[in-house]
Image (spheres, rainbow, N blue to C red):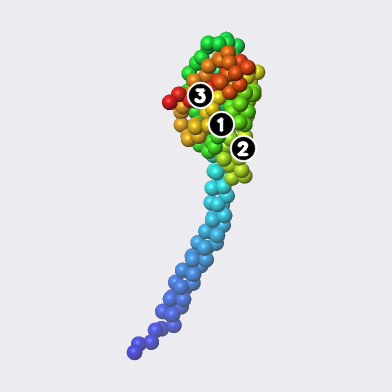
């Protein structure tokens, strides 16, 4: 059996030490990088929620503007509107939270902290039912002035209903 020389043992020891140092350096780098990746994913999730809230505000504002226009013209005025629904919308309330006659348009957005409400007020009585519109996408909505509101016939209102 051949014995290794002391020169061969020290060379093997240096190579093993270099490999161990490289392994330690990579491990420390990954230990620092891993929390940063988690923080980046959390921030990305919060950014998506913010974008949904901004898009919901734009949709509610667009509807409120059309409602004011149609309400000012009075019956039998009507208009079809393309409405962009962002991701995360759970429900849309027109008038009030039971879709009765009121002065608000509310989009409920699902967030990690629970529901978030985006509300736009109108000077005109408004009612309708857009509850079936909860998936992300573009929808056509019929906005019409009514002399007798379908949800409360003693009032004039602007009524919103999705076009199917």
Q: Which residue is drawn at 41% across and 83% down?
A: 5
- Examine the rendered structure and indicate whether residue 41 appears above or below residue 57: below
Which badge, 3 or 1, comes first in the chain's sequence? Answer: 1
Relative image position of residue 93 (x, y in whole percent): 58, 30
Q: Residue at x 41, y 79 (%)?
A: 8
Residue at disc 1, secondary structure: strand
Residue tagged 3? 161
Residue tagged 2? 116
Q: Which mark's residue is nearer the viewer, 2 or 3?
A: 3
Q: How far apart, in angstroms, are the residues tagged by discs 1 and 2?
A: 12 Å
Which badge, 1 or 2, comes first in the chain's sequence? Answer: 1
Quadrant location of the C terminus in the rendered image: top left
* Residue closest to the eye, 24 or 148: 148
* Residue closest to the eye, 45 or 96: 96
Q: Residue furthest front?
A: 153
Q: Which residue is drawn at 46% across and 68% down?
A: 19
Q: Marks 3 and 2: in contact by CB < 8 Å?
A: no
Near mark 3 (Cα within 10 A), the count class, few <14, some 14-19 or many ≥20, is some
Near mark 2 (Cα within 10 A), the count class, few <14, some 14-19 or many ≥20, is some
- Examine the rendered structure and indicate whether residue 45 appears above or below residue 22: above
Which badge, 2 or 3, comes first in the chain's sequence? Answer: 2
Q: Can residue 157 be seen in this view?
A: no
Q: Is residue 131 left or right of residue 123?
A: left
Q: Which residue lies furthest to the bottom in this view?
A: 1
Q: Marks 2 and 1: in contact by CB < 8 Å?
A: no
Quadrant location of the N terminus in the rendered image: bottom left
Residue tagged 1? 92
Residue at disc 3, secondary structure: strand
Q: How far apart, in angstroms, are the residues tagged by discs 2 and 3?
A: 23 Å
Q: How far apart, in angstroms, are the residues tagged by discs 3 and 1?
A: 11 Å
Relative image position of residue 67 (x, y in whole percent): 57, 18
């Amino acid at each position: 059996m051949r014995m290794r020389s002391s020169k061969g043992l020290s060379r093997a020891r240096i190579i093993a030490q270099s490999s161990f140092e490289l392994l330690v350096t990579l491990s420390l780098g990954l230990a620092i990088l891993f929390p940063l990746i988690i923080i980046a994913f959390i921030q990305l999730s919060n950014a998506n929620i913010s974008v949904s809230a901004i898009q919901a505000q734009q949709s509610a504002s667009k509807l409120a503007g059309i409602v004011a226009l149609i309400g000012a013209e009075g019956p039998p005025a009507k208009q079809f509107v393309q409405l962009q629904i962002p991701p995360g919308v759970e429900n849309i309330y027109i008038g009030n939270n039971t879709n009765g006659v009121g002065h608000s348009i509310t989009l409920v957005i699902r967030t990690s902290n629970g529901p978030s409400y985006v509300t736009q007020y109108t000077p005109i009585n408004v009612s309708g039912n857009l509850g079936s519109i909860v998936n992300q996408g573009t929808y056509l909505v019929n906005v019409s002035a009514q002399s007798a509101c379908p949800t409360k016939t003693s009032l004039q209102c602007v009524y919103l209903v999705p076009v199917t």
